[in-house]
Amino acid sequence: MKRFVWPVGVLVALLVTNVFFSHSFFSIEMRGGHLYGSVVDILRSSSPLALVALGMTLVIATGGIDLSVGAVVAIAGALACLHISGLSDQGSVAGVLVAVGLALALSLVLGVWNGFLVATIGIQPIIATLILMVAGRGLAQLITDGQIITVNSGPYKMIGAGYWLGLPLCVLIAGAVIALAAVLVRRSALGMLLEAVGGNAEASRLAGIKSRWLILAVYVFAAVCAGVAGLMISSNVSSADGNNAGLLIELDAILAVVIGGTSLSGGRFSIVGTVLGAVIIKTLDITIYTVGVPPEVTLLFKAVVVIVLCLAQSAKFRAMFQRSRPVVAAAPADEKVQVRA
Amino acid sequence: MTTLDTPGRNWAKVAGNLLRKPAMATAILLCIMYGAGVLRYDGFDDTQIVLNVFIDNGFLLVVAVGMTFVILTGGIDLSVGAVVALTTMIAASLLEKGLNPALVLVVVLAVGGLIGLGMGCIIHFFDIQPFIATLAGMFLARGTCYVISTDSIPITNEWWNNVASDKLRFGGFHISWSVVIAAVVVAAAAYVLAYTRLGRNIYALGGNQQSALLMGLPVGRTRIAVYTISGVCSALGGVLLTFYTPSGYGLNALGMELDAIAAVVIGGTVLTGGSGFVLGTVLGVGVLGLIQTIITFQGTLSSWWTKIVIGVLLFVFIVLQRTVTRKQTARRAR
């Protein structure tokens, strides 16, 4: 648990700040059979990010990275909305299910494409997924024909904004997927195999691990997760915007993974940490809102938190404060702290 | 292994062998695209069309040159678009206050350099991945834009606008000062990379960091230098952008880092570092610009086709690079 000290500390600090500025922050009430409250809001808004970050965690565990998830988010939402807008009865559950199925199937295909480039052709992941990141936005706009498609479908709206058993449906979906993934990778050897591939793909291949298939699988999983997140995001606003849906979500997701203590170089991952990271990012957004910081400063605030968290996890930075263990490499770093400050 | 020549020739040979093909491929592609344009559309053969590509993309060219330095060391700089936006913002707000344009230029270039320096230091001294450090830099720069103002600030300074709209005419054609500045930057970058100690160090660092360190090359200084150069180039790119559209806005140059990276890759620079040319980047920017021109000439194609075509080109060039590198490795093994 020691490695979660920093993320948990930041989360607690953020929550305490919130209570300080808004005393009813933790109060949750039942209204019309639904739970309402800031905490529920945080969970709801962090569901899509947590899902995307979950997929990203497994990709990063194998030493890869997936930049295309934002584009996949946009494409999934666009295709689903396009299909629903073409239905004669937008409220039909069957039609919505077909739309969801189509969107997820396309996400899966995109994931296979990424995985094929990385695992079969052997292109560096950051470049391989850059292709879909650039082309995918164009593809999403092609699907929506450059317009914002609005739909008016009750069942579709349920995915992102609906409630079930008093809880937001999207939180339940995200929770279920995360729990399933966690059980799958930690209760079987799968997680260890992924870490082995991330640690040394060649060595793990020689040890008899089918690293190629594992790598393909994680990219597919990441794309499908992004697809589900895309459905949530577009359903929440009942529209699809090929240009702006999921914009920069890949960066937030990578950030969530890093905050959660997963190393970007692969070989080690933590799903709990990632979920914590996603919740921290969204709590940060809400904190900025409650504290009354003007929204213009949000990004600046985020930058500071990112820098602090990354420095806190940097071994060299920590070494500077441990005088008992002199580290040669960190010695000239003292004067550089002021550069940033 | 080959016998050791003088270092200069050896480097040229290694770089030439590895990358002549992708860079040549870019040049051929450029010619084919241009030829197709000339055949298909009326008025495409006007030399001014070619010049316009560079007038419209001068700022991208400067930013992409900075990105080339970073990518040659095997790093990446995600902050360039945000630094461009920040530059336009600072320049516009300072000019609005009536500051001397020359002073404004110095200030924005210094800010760009400082951001790059800061990121370089964080990357080197604290072992933070370039991806994350420059991501933080991106948030920082964009955030600062919104702190300055959330609205667009027009630039009304007379000198600034004169430079922006000034056309250098020769023989019936014209270019803008942006093109001249971009050309100077390209020439300077090409010189630094090919003929200076810093340039050698950059290739060495990108080729193999461990070897560079063991050879006693100043790895830290080089790495910090490339991010600083990229920061200054981004700031200069921002200045050129204000020449092109005279206003400062926090949403300027959104996603420009992708265009810059794409231009560098299409230009034949290998993203893992160690080999590539600035001239290739010029060709890469030319390809991106020509795609836009063709789509404008076609008239019936929507703007998003640009992105799809760029994606397809990226794919082709990356696969091409991959096969070339594979052949090289195979030949070395033999």
Image (tube, rainbow, N blue to C red):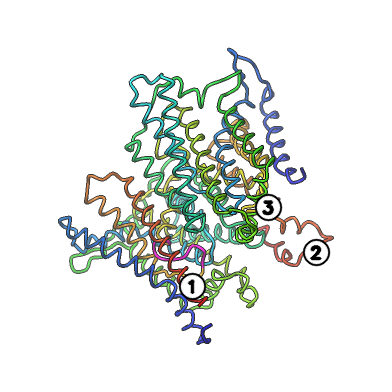
- Work out which quarter of the rendered image holds the N terminus of chain A and state it: top right
- Between B248 and A37, the one lying in front of the other is A37
Q: Secondary structure at mark 1?
A: helix
Q: Is residue B272 magenta?
A: yes
Residue corresponding to mark 1: B330
Q: How many marks?
A: 3
For label 1, count other residues whose C-alpha is less than 10 Å away and answer few (under 14), some (14-19) or many (20+).
few
Q: Position of residue B327 (x, y in %)?
A: 45, 71
State the separation of the CA atoms marked 2 and 1: 45 Å
**Residue A271: quadrant of the picture:** top right
Residue corresponding to mark 2: A326
Q: Is residue A312 left or right of residue A223?
A: right
- Callout in the foreground (3, 1): 1
Q: Position of residue A49 (x, y in %)?
A: 56, 37
Q: Residue at x 18, y 62 (%)?
A: B45
Q: Secondary structure at mark 3?
A: helix
Vertical comparison of B21 with B64: above or below:
below
Q: Which chain letter goes with mark 1? A: B
Q: Secondary structure at mark 2?
A: loop
What is the span of residues highlighted in magenta in the rendered image? B265-273
Q: Residue furthest top?
A: A32
- Callout in the foreground (2, 1): 1
Q: Position of residue B90 (x, y in %)?
A: 47, 51
Q: Is residue A308 left or right of residue A148?
A: right
Q: Earlier in the sequence, mark 2 or mark 3?
A: 3
State the separation of the CA atoms marked 2 and 3: 18 Å
Q: Residue at x 50, y 60 (%)?
A: B231
Q: Which chain letter goes with mark 2? A: A
Residue corresponding to mark 3: A311
**Amino acid under label 2?**
Pro
